[in-house]
Amino acid sequence: MTLAPLLSIPSPSDPLIAELGPLKIRWYGTLIALGIVLAGWLAGRELERRGYPPGRAYAIAVWCVPGGVIGARLYHVVTDWDRFSGHLERIPLLQQGGLGMPGVIVGGAIGAWIGARRVNIPALEVFDVLAPGLILAQAIGRWGNYFNQELFGGPTDLPWGLEIDPAHRPER
């Protein structure tokens, strides 16, 4: 008997948590939202520890989160332009996938800078406060990629390799 089947990591068969009529609750979006909430909570605690009034983190997040989402989408559109050229109406269709971390960083940083100015906290201090929560949010968000069966490594014969359904594997 070989241990390989016992050690491999199966991928989830469905990216959906639930369907409530036309509303589809997906693991990816839910985990991204959880990461954002936890990052905001951590930032809020740190800002309060530094003597700032409660609620400042969420006042910054109102700018930071949309900036990150817009930046992420624009990065995807620019780097995958062939999917959007001649079909500009597809750009806002986030439910069809396509967000890029470099865009999150740039767009989120711009939003955080705007938010920092609005609450009168130095931007560099805001960046410092946000960093730990962003790392946590990124880690949680990667689990969304796991449920979508995306962002995996190359083929392996190792027994602990991740099992990816054939429909989600890239063409060779």
Image (cartoon, rainbow, N blue to C red):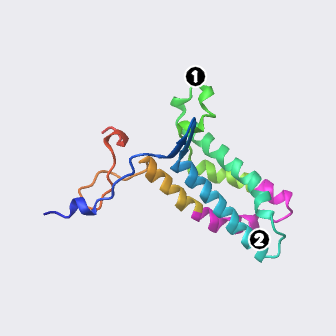
Q: In the rendered view, would you say 39 is above or below 69? A: below
Instruction: Name the secondary structure under disc 1.
Output: loop
The residue lying at 34 percent from left, 48 percent from top is: 164
Q: Which of marks 2 and 1 is in front?
A: 2
The residue lying at 68 percent from left, 53 percent from top is: 108
Q: In the rendered view, would you say 107 is above or below 39? A: above
Question: Could you say which is closer to the camera, residue 88 or residue 37?
Answer: 37
Visible residue check, residue 60: yes
Amino acid under label 2? Leu
Q: Mark 2 and 1 residues: CB-CB less than 8 Å, in contact?
A: no
Alpha carbons under labels 2 and 1: distance apart:
45 Å
Q: How many labels does the image show?
A: 2
Queried whether the magenta region covers residue 120, the answer comes back as yes
| Residue farthest top in this picture | 86
Q: In the rendered view, would you say 48 is above or below 139? A: below
Identify the magenta region: 113-136
Say which residue label 1 marks. Answer: 86
Q: How crowded is mark 1: few (under 14 residues within 10 Å), some or many (20 or more)?
A: few
In the image, taking residue 123 as reference, residue 146 lies left or right, namely: left
**Quadrant housing residue 114:** bottom right
Residue 47 is situated, as x and y percent measured from the top left of the image, at 77, 71
Which sits earlier in the primary sequence, circle 2 or circle 1? 2
